[in-house]
Amino acid sequence: MIEVKNLTVRYGGVTSLDGMDLRFEKGVCGLIGPNGAGKTTFFNVLSGFVRPVSGSVTAFGDDLLKLAHYRRARWGVRRTFQTEQAISDLSVYDNVSMIHSKLRGPARRDDVLASIAFVGGGISPWAKVGSLTAGQRRLVEVARAVAGRPRLVLLDEPAAGLPDDETSHLTGVIRAIPAQTGALTILVDHDMVLVNAVCETTAVLDFGRLIASGPTAQVLRDEHVMRAYLGTAEVV
Ligand SMILES: Nc1ncnc2c1ncn2[C@@H]1O[C@H](COP(=O)(O)OP(=O)(O)OP(=O)(O)O)[C@@H](O)[C@H]1O
Ligand SMILES: [Mg+2]
């Protein structure tokens, strides 16, 4: 469980998160909102890249903001980024094994291989990342996020730009992350079909403020949410 209270982030004159209050219980939770709403900023706070001016974040009873940013990975925070992070010249295995892990020796090797097998997509652990398709590289990013016993998995637009068949494969993978790892998973994406398919609950940010949260189907029908996104049209 993660509980966020009164979280505010400012960049000079821009208020990116404005007294955000939020609670995510378990499973895969959605976080949506228009461009610039503050979704990536929220992930940056959780992973320690950005220090808020006020607010608290409690994750599984721990005060996350008190942990130095380099301790967050050890604690169990994992994330993917809107831009690719995997190193093209290295193998898939080497890219995934760079992730912080409490495991050592054969258990660590098994965990890396299991994470690669988990994301599927016909990826050989020994292939160079540079030789993979765009969709396979995206799966490598997810494998990095599920390796090493994570407690909190943050996925920032993992489906952006993927064709439908690869998005549908990714849908199954994301849905299975909590059962595979035990981690609370937060999905940020603009693909409402994906969000609807994998997230039991969803929260909506607009201009750094929470404007709705609850069961996904209900949130996506919410009038304020539809207006924030599209004017008046339906989101799904
Ligand atoms: N490093 C920064 N310096 C200044 N302003 C920033 C910085 N990072 C983000 N912002 C601003 O904070 C606001 C929120 O940005 P953020 O990237 O969190 O939005 P987002 O919801 O992830 O949007 P998108 O859907 O486009 O990825 C925007 O107004 C953005 O311009
Ligand atoms: Mg973003």
Image (spheres, rainbow, N blue to C red):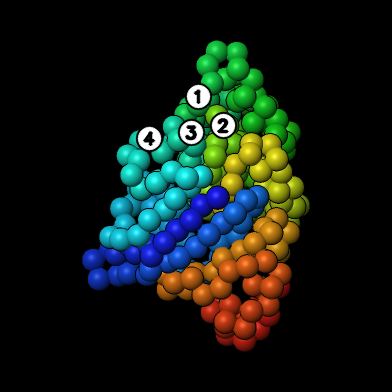
Q: CA distance from mark 3 to mark 1?
A: 22 Å
Quadrant assignment for the C terminus: bottom right
Q: Earlier in the sequence, mark 4 or mark 3?
A: 4
Label 1: element kind: loop
Horizontal arrangement in the rendering, residue 206 relative to residue 49 (left or right): right
Q: Residue at the location (58% across, 77% down)? A: 225
Q: Is residue 69 visible?
A: no
Circles 2 and 1, Cβ within 8 Å, touching? The answer is: yes
Asked if 22 appears above or below 60 in the picture, the reply is below
Dot 2 amino acid type? Arg
Q: Residues within 10 Å of mark 3 (few under 14, many from 20)?
A: some
Instruction: Please give the label number shown on residue 149.
Output: 2
Q: Earlier in the sequence, mark 2 or mark 1?
A: 1
Q: CA distance from mark 4 to mark 3?
A: 23 Å
Circles 4 and 3, Cβ within 8 Å, touching? The answer is: no
- Residue with the mark numbered 1: 102
Q: Earlier in the sequence, mark 3 or mark 1?
A: 3
Q: CA distance from mark 2 to mark 1?
A: 7 Å
Label 2: element kind: loop
- Residue with the mark numbered 4: 71
